[in-house]
Amino acid sequence: MINNEATLEYSIQMFYRFGWVSFGMVFFFNIGFIILYIFDFVRGCRMTNQQMMDEARKVYYYDKLKAYEEENADVPLGLVNKWVKKGNLNDRNYDVLPDVNIRIEYYRIAKLSNGNFEV
């Protein structure tokens, strides 16, 4: 069995095919990585770092608040306000908010032409 030419040829063909399948899998993985890199690069060119951080923060706190709302029936108003403020969740889907009044204040500081600041 060990020195049989048919077995030896079959083993060589099996390793040869396995090598090509492995090469193809690595190739597709690398192509996918390059596509994701190009997508991230184009997205990075269209958005500033501040916008990307704001979006990530918004998603994080929205998911955190949603998970807390699903686990607990009574959500403390202070906790909701804290997470809404930290995540800047002003444009949330209000249908899924708990039945509480949330007040979100927004201040804009502008520099006037005379050099003074206005709130």
Image (cartoon, rainbow, N blue to C red):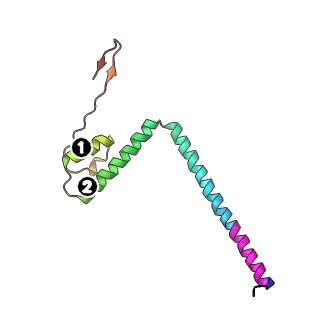
Task: Give the total of numbered labels.
Answer: 2
Q: Which residue is mark 1?
A: 81
Please, what is the three-letter code of the amino acid marked with disc 1?
Asn
Task: Give the residue drawn at x 31%, y 47%.
Answer: 93
How far across and down, in percent of the image, does residue 32 sit? 59, 54
Residue 89 visible in image: no
Q: Which of the two residues, 11 or 101, is positioned nearer the viewer here? A: 11
Toward the bottom, the furthest residue is 1
Residue 13 as seen in the image, left or right of residue 82: right
Mark 1 residue crowding within 10 angstroms, few (<14) / some (14–19) / many (20+): some
Q: Which of the two residues, 83 or 94, is positioned nearer the viewer here? A: 83
Give the magenta-colored segment's residue range: 6-19
* Secondary structure under the numbered disc 2 in the rendered image: helix
Please, what is the three-letter code of the amino acid marked with disc 2?
Glu
Task: Give the residue drawn at x 66%, y 65%.
Answer: 22
Task: Give the residue drawn at x 21%, y 52%.
Answer: 75
Write down the quadrant of residue 50 in the picture: top left
Quarter of the image where the N terminus is located:
bottom right
Q: Which of the two residues, 72 or 100, is positioned nearer the viewer here? A: 72
Give yes or no for residue 116 being in the magenta stretch. Answer: no
How far across and down, in percent of the image, does residue 109 sit? 31, 24
Q: Which residue is mark 2?
A: 69
Give yes or no for residue 12 being in the magenta stretch. Answer: yes
